[in-house]
Amino acid sequence: MIVGIIGNAIGIGGGILLIPFFLFYMHLHPIEASGLSLFTIIASTLGGSIRFFKEKAVDKNLYLMIALFAIPGVILGSVISKFVEVKQFTNIFGFIIICIGLFSVIATKKQSKTITEDIHNYVIKSPFSIRIFSLIAGFISGLLGIGIGGITGTFLTAIEQIPPRIAFSTIIFVMPLTSMIGSLVHFSYIKFSPKILVFLIPLTIGAITGSQIGAFISKNSKAKHLRLYQGWIITFLGFLMLIINR
C-alpha cells in the first residue's frame, strides 16, 4: 500500500521501493524480485491510471510515443537480466538509481521557475528525444524490475517542460502495459510455485488501495514538490542499496 501511495503520487511506479525490500528482507533472487516488483507495479499503476484518465490528465499522443519505444526496451532488459549475478545486480541497481535521483533533484532546482502547473498550456518539443529516453527507461525497467517513471518523468518535466501532472499521469498510464510484459518475461525464467502466488495476493490488494490515495495526493500537490520528492526518495534508496550490499 505504501508503494502504491508513493509511486502514484510521484510517478515512479514503486519498483524502486520494492526491489530492496524483496532482496534484503525477503531474500528473494533478483529475477523473482524483479518479476514480483513489475507485477505489483501493474496493480499499483492500474488503479491510478484509470483515475488519471477519467480526470483527463493523460496525453494520448505522449502515451503512444512512450509506449511504442518503452516496450522493446523492457523486453530487451528483461532478457539480459537473466545473465546478471546477484552481486552485480545490486551494485548496478544502486548506481543507476542514484544517477536517476540526482538528475531529478538537480533538474528540478535549476528549472523550478519554469515549471508550469497549467495542464492545458504546453507543447511536445522533441518527440524523437522522448522516444529515445523511453527506450532507455524501458531497458532499465526490464533489467532492474522498476517502473519507467524515474527516467522518463524527469526528462519530460525537466527537459521537455511538460506539466508534471500530465507527465506523471501519462507515465503511470503506460506502466501497467510495460510492467506486465516485463513480469511475464521474468516469470518465464523461474518455476512458478505457491509461494509466488501467496506473495501476489497481498501485494495486489495493497498496491491497488495505495494507488487511489497516491492519485489523490498527486492531484492536490504542487509540481515542484512532486519532482523534489521523487528525486530525493530515489537518491536515498540508491545509496541505501550500495551501503547494504557492502
Image (tube, rainbow, N blue to C red):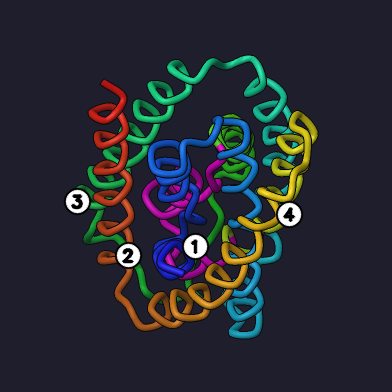
- Overall secondary structure of the magenta section: helix
Q: How far separated are the C-alphas under marks 4 and 1?
A: 15 Å
Q: Earlier in the sequence, mark 2 or mark 1?
A: 1
Tell me the kind of residue under disc 3.
Answer: Lys
Q: Which mark is residue 226?
A: 2
Q: How far separated are the C-alphas under marks 3 and 1?
A: 18 Å
Which residue, given by chain and number where applicable, does mark 1 sit on? 168
Q: Which residues are magenta?
A: 145-170
Which residue, given by chain and number where applicable, does mark 3 sit on? 109
Query: Which of label 4 and label 2 is nearer to you?
Result: 4
Q: Are marks 2 and 1 in contact (CB under 8 Å)?
A: yes
Tell me the kind of residue under disc 1.
Answer: Phe
- The residue nearer to you, when weighing 77 against 70, is 77
- Give the secondary structure at mark 1: helix
Q: Earlier in the sequence, mark 4 or mark 1?
A: 1
The quadrant where residue 237 appears: top left
- Give the secondary structure at mark 3: helix
Q: Which residue is rendered at x = 32% and y = 58% of the image?
A: 227
